[in-house]
Image: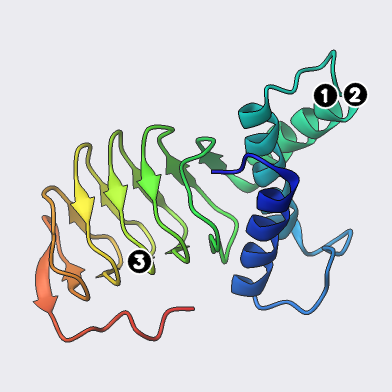
Amino acid sequence: MIGSREDLARYIEADRLVLRTNRRRPRFLCDETWHYLRLLRRMEYYHNCGVSVFSSPRYLVDRIRFRRLSLLLGFRIGLNSCGQGLSLPHPGTVIINSTAQIGSNCRIHVGVMIGANVVIGDRVYLGPGVKILPRVSIADGTVVGANAVVTKSFAQPGVTLAGAPARPINSNGSARFIN
């Protein structure tokens, strides 16, 4: 959770490293996802520190930019739901409920929907089109294949899930290549 400027800088740096860019700041054009992640982290910081329009004029500008970029890219991510090192490689519909808890260094592709009260571990890969229903837990290092529908919890780390409903197809640590 981002509660200080040091935490904010650490989260932004972790997100930058996962995006594999050498630039300290995103380019004006072509780095929309990175712009979005930076604004997401700033909005989390403002939320956690109790910043409002009256205490910071920059808050209003950032809030307007964040909303516009959310609509443009198709991202609907609840504040304080994702750990540091979040990777959103492509613009497209990504919906994450504000009550979900996603660990660090996770990669989330286009078309992913994560329901309420979902707990996802660290280093999890969610392929395109994955749907995770409410009140489900996924262990660290899990890979969820494209278009899988996760309807129940999976506690074993390093499992590959696929299908609708999702079921384990491999359990030999297949998520070690992520990030």
Asked if one can make out residue 156 in the rendered structure from this viewpoint, the answer is yes
Which residue is drawn at the image coordinates 76% and 18% (left, top)? 52
> Marks 2 and 3: CB-CB under 8 Å?
no
Badge nearest the viewer, 2 or 1: 2
The amino acid on which the numbered mark 3 sits, given as a three-letter code, is Val
Which comes sooner in the sequence, label 2 or label 3?
2
Nearer to us in this view, 48 or 15 = 48
Asked if one can make out residue 144 in the rendered structure from this viewpoint, the answer is no
Q: Position of residue 99 (x, y in %)?
A: 37, 32
The residue indicated by pointer 2 is 57
Which residue is drawn at the image coordinates 26% and 84% (left, top)? 174
**How many neighbours does mark 3 have within 10 angstroms: few (below 14), some (14-19), or many (20 or more)?**
many
28 shown above or below 5: below
Element marked by disc 1: helix
Element marked by disc 2: helix
The residue indicated by pointer 1 is 60
Which residue is drawn at the image coordinates 44% and 42% (left, top)? 95
Q: Position of residue 79 (x, y in %)?
A: 54, 35
Q: Position of residue 129 (x, y in %)?
A: 35, 57
Element marked by disc 3: loop
Q: Position of residue 9 (x, y in %)?
A: 73, 56
Q: Left of 1 or right of it: where is 67?
A: right
> Marks 1 and 3: CB-CB under 8 Å?
no
Which comes sooner in the sequence, label 1 or label 3?
1
53 shown above or below 158: above
In the picture, residue 62 is in which quadrant? Answer: top right
In the picture, residue 29 is in which quadrant? Answer: bottom right
Q: Left of 16 or right of it: where is 18?
A: left
The residue indicated by pointer 3 is 124
Which residue is drawn at the image coordinates 88% and 30% (left, top)? 58
